[in-house]
Amino acid sequence: MSYQVDFEPLGRRLGVGRGVSILTAAQQAGVGLVSICGGKGTCGRCQVQVLEGQLSPLSETEAKNLTPDELASGYRLACQAEVLSDLRLHIPPHSLTATQRTQVEGRELTVPIVPVVVGCDFRLSPPTREDIRSDVDRMRDHLALLDYGDLIIDFAVLRQLSTQLREWGWSGTVGLRGREVVSFGPLGRKLLGLAVDLGTTKLAGYLVELQTGRTLAAAGAMNPQIAYGEDVMARIAYAMEGEEQAATLREAAVGAVNDLAHTLCTQSGHLPEEIVEAVVVGNTAMHHLFLGLPVRQLGLAPYLPAVSDALDLKAREVGLEIAPGGYVHLLPNIAGFVGTDHVAMILSTKIYEAEGTVLGLDIGTNTEVVLRAKGRLIACSTASGPAFEGAHIKDGMRAAEGAIERLRITASGVEYQTIGDAPAVGICGSGVLDAVAQLRQLGVLDERGNMGDHHRVRRTQHGPEFVLVAAGEGGNSGDVVITRGDVGEIQLAKGAIRAGINILLDEAGLSAQDIDQVIIAGAFGTYIDVSSAIVIGMFPPLALERFNQVGNAAGMGAKLALVSREQRARAAEVARQVEYIELTNDRRFVDEFARAMYLK
Ligand code: FES
């Protein structure tokens, strides 16, 4: 007897025999589930939610590893539960291995699609001896008949128009942005949009069909500016060295967006000139560096942006290689350290209209925190540093093949899972977070982060380190360790984040227990084990059901602004509504930060 198993939101479906475990079914369907214990039922990480269908009765192991709330919500452990009927399962992001989480992030948009640029197909009657109107008049008159009014034609479009009209037999598709013709292509050409989240460390890009809002391709890339400084302040300092340095950073950012656009187009069989509108979001420093705006005032107290308004600029003026008449739209930013990416995140998560008390975090090199409480939106930004990207961690690495992404320390050793199930070559941010949490729970680390004795702890001239994987174990070639210094890096990062959360709560006159929901955005935030983040005190100790890991919400917000005029207007309202707190001036910050560094 064979049953259909649907894995949502990945859209994978597979027929399996009765009694097969969900973990096996997932593996056969190419769904990468986290399974640190290898299916023994002890790690509790392979959670899936049953939406429809029947599974084997709850095992004792599951009852022990799942909370009453999780059980009530239909959660089961994939390695324990067996298929007894057709099934529809929801796979939460935290149960997916890194390689697959990006697919979940490509979810389709759910707003009415009303893009700023609309396409209009036309067929003109060719000129005759009696009809000697200019090419532009001919097209304008025709489009006026179709109710497109009095048109302005972009100069770059005008330059190509006459040749192309003849080449395409007096027919074509124009892209209209209000009254302006911004593109001209062969009849039936689809208009495309590009949404980019320009992060300090990474970029994420989406190619979208403007008419339908459908995502045609999604891709990520490293921000090449990293060669000139790891964090925002280092980049600003570099740009302040002179015009040449500022131009280098601008060209690096623009070049990276152009490369990403090419990659997306190659992936989906399109051409960059089919992109008629782009939306780029990023923190305020990335926004300014991308546009070539001065950043000196951003780097010096009181850290002011040059401009906070939304901007509509000709893409060619910025250096973007899309349709020559196309525009790039930049959402408004809020302050020197809370940029358009945060506005995009608030937009896509709808925190602005949430009932109750909702905390939103976009974790990155800078972590933006927003609190929706008592009808207010209060935000701050905190320098959490690049440790979560694996930087400044002895064996740290990006979330790439061979990185330990999840781990558990048991009496018998260290159980771990690597990205791509490859031999361990290092550890990425989510793995480091797990390691610190596990070592704290075992008592190997004290509250201050000092490392005590354990048979896996060795003392080196640089201080103590805990051996997670010894050379030769599991086919890896070298050791993977966590040092006292690594623990300190995580303490700094998580201390900054928790201090930001506490100050916003204080501002609203609330305590952590008043938080109804925590929304965690950003690639790193999606990968982490929330319970580890709670153990080390990065997040307040709330029931796990109150946490919602939503992936790249800034990228989603950029997509919304790309396909919906209403969402663009909403973004402007959100930016106006946010009350910003500058932590560097805040008298509470030093104490809160010092307290939040402890591993409580
Ligand atoms: Fe299912 Fe570990 S793989 S509990």
Image (cartoon, rainbow, N blue to C red):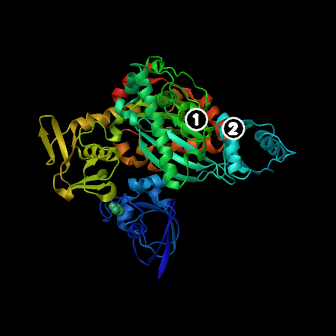
Where the C terminus falls, by quadrant? top left
In the structure shown, which secondary structural element does the residue marked by tag 2 occupy? helix
- Residue 352 screen position, x and y as percent: 60, 38
Q: Nearer the viewer, residue 263 or 445?
A: 263
**Which is more N-terminal, label 2 or label 1?**
2
Amino acid tagged 1: Ala
Farthest right residue in view:
130
Classify mark 1: residues with Cα within 10 Å, few (<14), some (14-19) or many (20+). Answer: many
Q: Would you say the residues marked 1 and 2 are in contact, meaning their CB atoms lie under 8 Å apart?
A: no
Q: Which mark is residue 325?
A: none
Residue 363 visible: yes
Q: Which mark is residue 158?
A: 2
- Residue 488 screen position, x and y as percent: 27, 34
Separation of marks 1 and 2 at Cα, in angstroms: 16 Å
Mark 1 or 2: in front is 2
Which residue was labeled with disc 1? Answer: 315
Q: Nearer the viewer, residue 240 or 243?
A: 243
Amino acid tagged 2: Leu
- Residue 548 screen position, x and y as percent: 49, 48
Q: How many marks?
A: 2
